[in-house]
């Protein structure tokens, strides 16, 4: 099979959560264990860092991978879902897994797939672990897909675990309280393995402390040692001043991920780098500063408050749940524009009404949908939006919605594309023709 034929085989043969939702979710680790047993347990052939959280885990994963790359380590990175190309999920030092390996691995695993009946995500995890083991990476940064306790990635024995934060998302699977969701995320905490908590709230703190105590895992709250004392936001960069609470010294970091939520993500990133230093990794302050200036270039991360055009300003952001949208609104408050145009689409299993209730009524809306079965119908989204005073029309696909927004926008206006990673993934960046085109 060709690469394209292989992908079509995988998409059609295996249940895929991003396309069909909960029906593809396997609430146990049995299939992943079986696949990796067949592959001679590649997950134990490399060192790893495990990252979970409601929001921020993608940015933290890519940033840590960038730091390790800058420090000279051969670094694997497993994330999901992808924006443009399936191979974005599996990288080594920023380079995507070769098409040839995807083809050969799939051919090798066909009989085993018939026997085990894995989901798309389960097979993808096994593929990533096999590639990292074959390439003998020094370390791999592994992002959970959904939850933690029963996530397919949770068969690794990491050097370090990180939980970025807890918010309301995937409640139909993870639970409808913050305590229940935190319990699922806390499932990545392993015996005698340090765990860093990026953001803690009263509802979740006991959950983390009880799990860490039961596992005899050292617990580190990122905000105990450092705090953000100042920041300077520009459209494409964010300068952040971090003060070490223990020494009183302040250092400035310039980030190429300009979202204000990076002021939260940077604390667990720095705490993780410090933990790795105590484990013998040679990571200097210069490695950290250099890496954080070029995370997008080093790791291929896109869609996090990403500017792809200046006049009018066009921003892409994958925010899709209550917490993410709240952070987006904080960013909007600091961004100058004459009139706001919002292109948005969502998937059916999100808390759609809770998101819509947060959105500004002064904007013009272009309700749309990504090309996948889970996408909420654009017309239905527009009708729901109207119930919250959000005025706009529905559009059958993402790029047509963007074209209409651009046609209506003046040079001083802003077009924000958000609501779903799948909406952002379908943006045709070649239509913009400017130097800051992002999704390549």
Image: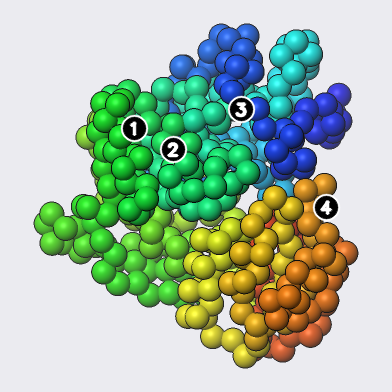
Disc 1 target residue: 211
Which residue sits at x=58%, y=10%?
A: 37
Q: Secondary structure at mark 3?
A: loop
Circle 4 is placed at which residue position?
371
Q: Position of residue 306 (x, y in %)?
A: 58, 65
- Whether residue 240 is visible, yes or no, is yes
From the top left corner, tell me how far across and down residue 216 is, in percent: 26, 26
Which residue is pictured at 49% across the width and 53% down the height? Answer: 167
User: Within 10 angstroms of label 4, few (less than 14), some, or many (20 or more) residues?
Assistant: some
Q: CA distance from mark 2 to mark 4?
A: 33 Å
Residue 233 % position (x, y): 43, 74
Which is in the foreground here, disc 2 or disc 4?
A: 2
Check contact, mark 3 vs mark 4: CB within 8 A.
Answer: no
Which residue sits at x=53%, y=73%? 329
Tell me: 159 left or right of 213: right
The residue beneath circle 3 is 27
Mark positioned earlier in the residue sequence (1 or 3): 3
């Amino acid at each position: 099979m060709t690469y394209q034929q292989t992908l079509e085989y995988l998409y059609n043969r295996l249940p895929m959560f991003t396309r069909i939702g909960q029906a593809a979710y396997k609430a146990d680790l049995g299939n992943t264990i079986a696949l990796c047993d067949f592959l001679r347990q590649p997950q134990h052939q490399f060192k790893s860092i495990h990252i979970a959280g409601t929001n921020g885990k993608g940015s933290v994963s890519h940033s840590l991978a960038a730091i390790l790359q800058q420090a000279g380590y051969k670094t694997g990175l497993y994330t999901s879902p992808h924006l443009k190309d399936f191979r974005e999920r599996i990288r080594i030092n920023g380079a995507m897994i070769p098409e040839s390996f995807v083809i050969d691995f799939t051919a090798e695993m066909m009989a085993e797939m018939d026997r085990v009946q894995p989901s798309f995500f389960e097979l993808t995890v096994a593929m990533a672990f096999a590639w990292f083991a074959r390439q003998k990476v020094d370390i791999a940064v592994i992002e959970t897909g959904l939850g933690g306790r029963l996530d397919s990635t949770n068969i690794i024995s990491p050097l370090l675990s990180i939980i970025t934060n807890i918010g309301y998302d995937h409640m139909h699977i993870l639970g409808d309280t913050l305590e229940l969701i935190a319990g699922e995320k806390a499932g990545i905490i392993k015996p005698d393995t340090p765990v860093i908590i990026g953001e803690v709230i009263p509802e979740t703190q006991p959950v983390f402390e009880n799990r860490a105590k039961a596992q005899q895992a050292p617990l580190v709250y990122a905000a105990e040692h450092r705090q953000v004392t100042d920041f300077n936001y520009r459209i494409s960069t964010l300068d952040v001043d971090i003060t070490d609470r223990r020494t009183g010294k302040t250092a400035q970091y310039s980030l190429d991920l300009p979202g204000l939520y990076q002021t939260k993500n940077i604390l667990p990133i720095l705490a993780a780098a410090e933990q790795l230093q105590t484990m013998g990794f040679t990571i200097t302050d210069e490695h950290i500063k250099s890496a954080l200036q070029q995370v997008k270039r080093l790791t291929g991360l896109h869609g996090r408050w990403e500017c792809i055009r200046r006049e009018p300003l066009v921003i892409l952001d994958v925010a899709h749940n209550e917490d993410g949208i709240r952070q987006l609104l904080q960013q909007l408050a600091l961004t100058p524009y004459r009139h706001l145009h919002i292109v948005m689409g969502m998937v059916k299993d999100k808390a759609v009404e809770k998101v819509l209730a947060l959105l500004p009524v002064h904007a013009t809306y272009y309700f749309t949908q990504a090309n996948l079965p889970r996408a909420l119908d654009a017309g239905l989204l527009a009708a729901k939006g109207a119930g919250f005073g959000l005025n706009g029309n529905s559009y059958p696909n993402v790029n047509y919605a963007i074209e209409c927004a651009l046609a209506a926008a003046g040079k001083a206006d802003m077009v924000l594309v958000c609501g779903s990673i799948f909406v952002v993934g379908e943006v045709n960046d070649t239509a913009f023709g400017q130097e800051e085109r992002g999704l390549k």
